[in-house]
Image: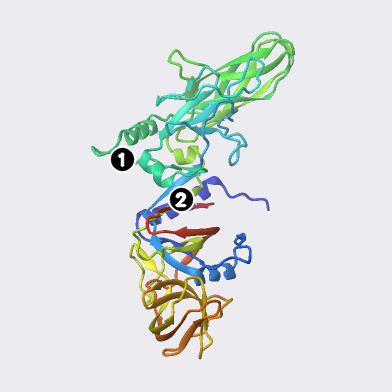
Amino acid sequence: MPAVVTDALKRQIASDFFEQFTSDSKKYYIGVGRSEIWDSNDLVPTPVNTPTEISGFRDGLQSVKKVTGTSLVVPRNNWSSGSIFSQYDDQQGGYPTNPYYVMTENNQVYVCLETGRNILGVAQPSSVEPTGSNNDSFRTADGYVWKFIFTVSAERGNDFMSSNFMPVQKQGNTDSNSTGIQLKQLEIQNAAVAGEVLSCIITGGGAGYTTNPTVTITGTGTGALVDAAIDSSTGQLVRLRMRDSGASAQVQGSGYTSANVVITGGGSPTLNATARAVLGPDSGIGRDSREDLKSTSIMFHAPLLGTDSDFITDQDFRQVGLIRDPLTVTGLIFNDTTGNALYNMSLSSTVTSFTKDKTIEGATSTAKAYIDNIDSNRLFYHQTAATGFGTFIHGETVEEVDGAGEGVIDSAATLPEVDPESGAILFIDNRSPVVRAAAQNEDVKVIIQF
């Protein structure tokens, strides 16, 4: 039977992840790894959702860092002059091609309630950037009607904004330490009006109109007023606008859970025009920006700092992943800020120095591994399906297969802090090599979309 997964369920799943993080009931970590090249040309493959892919990520894991913050996010749409923006539509599933909300250069977020149209009803490019933080909707000189929702703070922007996504949240209780941005968002939420008619959309222009008809909204609510305009050359209804009040807000009424658009008058039309009313979210536009902007994605953020000692410098990684509840090698929940996921061997003597990214082989065991890092007499390494998973032997000679390095093993397998075989792998991102330097910081942002 035909079925659909609603945005409400997707938002609930995303919110559940968010709650797990904020309540600290689950531990989330960003992991990086895979120092070896993808192929002879180091071309990045598209990851596939298979147990083999997940196993390969675990094999190459170098280090993990605890996620420092998480936020629900939505696609980022910057306002730009000359763009045509869609208007909020309660019959629109997902996101329209032309976005219905924007973020301005001041990081203020607005929802478009009416697209600007000329007297012939043709959608016009937006030419006036919305500004201000009024509680009510407002019409700009280009005919667009906007509703201010919230401002993305500099702090949240730094943590959760990317070129394609921006953070969204519902403001909770405020106190004396709350910022002006937080206070304003709570004010917007509290001022939201349930059951407004946000706009009316023409579904049939009719024919034979000689004067502008009268439009009446009937239904469960009261107070919504609409102005109509016809094209006198065609006799069709071409534009409907929510009436502007003296305070520049729109007369959208309240209390509507259902609304019908009744069109009367206009001379003696030969075919009656039809239209439908667009209702806001049940609690009112602005009450919950997560619902207004259809948030079904969550971003996990972790800064990788040059001072994070468990992360290798002068080495690259090609995979980034999100891990939930990794364990220590003794089976306990890992809870440190950072952790090393590589095995290492200590050498009793070094005949010839070793080099990162070379492949080593035990002379007796024939076990092979990739060298990830070298710290004095210690070689940090990982094994994959390509090297096999043989066991190095204490006291054997180990040599580089593709280099000159040679030494004698003292202790063959010192365990890592984090068990790479533990935890749920929730996300894998394959990348071109990222080389880390001691003074280098990376801002890793993982986005999961439902």
Residue ID at (71%, 18%): 272
The residue identified by callout 1 is 173
Label number found at residue 234: none
Q: Position of residue 136 (x, y in %)?
A: 43, 24
Marks 2, 1: nearer the viewer: 2
Q: Is residue 370 visible?
A: yes
Residue ID at (49%, 58%): 434
Q: Position of residue 68 (x, y in %)?
A: 37, 54
Residue projecting furthest to the right: 270
Q: Label 1 is placed on what type of residue?
A: Asn
Q: Earlier in the sequence, mark 2 or mark 1?
A: 1
Residue 52 falls in image quadrant: bottom right
Q: Position of residue 419 (x, y in %)?
A: 42, 73
Between 249 and 255, which is closer to the camera in this rendering? 249
425 sits left or right of 212 in the view: left
Above or below residue 346? Residue 138 is: above
Q: Secondary structure at mark 1?
A: loop
Label number found at residue 299: 2
Q: Secondary structure at mark 2?
A: strand
Above or below residue 13? Residue 252 is: above
Between 76 and 150, which is closer to the camera in this rendering? 76
Between 299 and 313, which is closer to the camera in this rendering? 313
303 sits left or right of 129 in the view: left
Residue 270 falls in image quadrant: top right
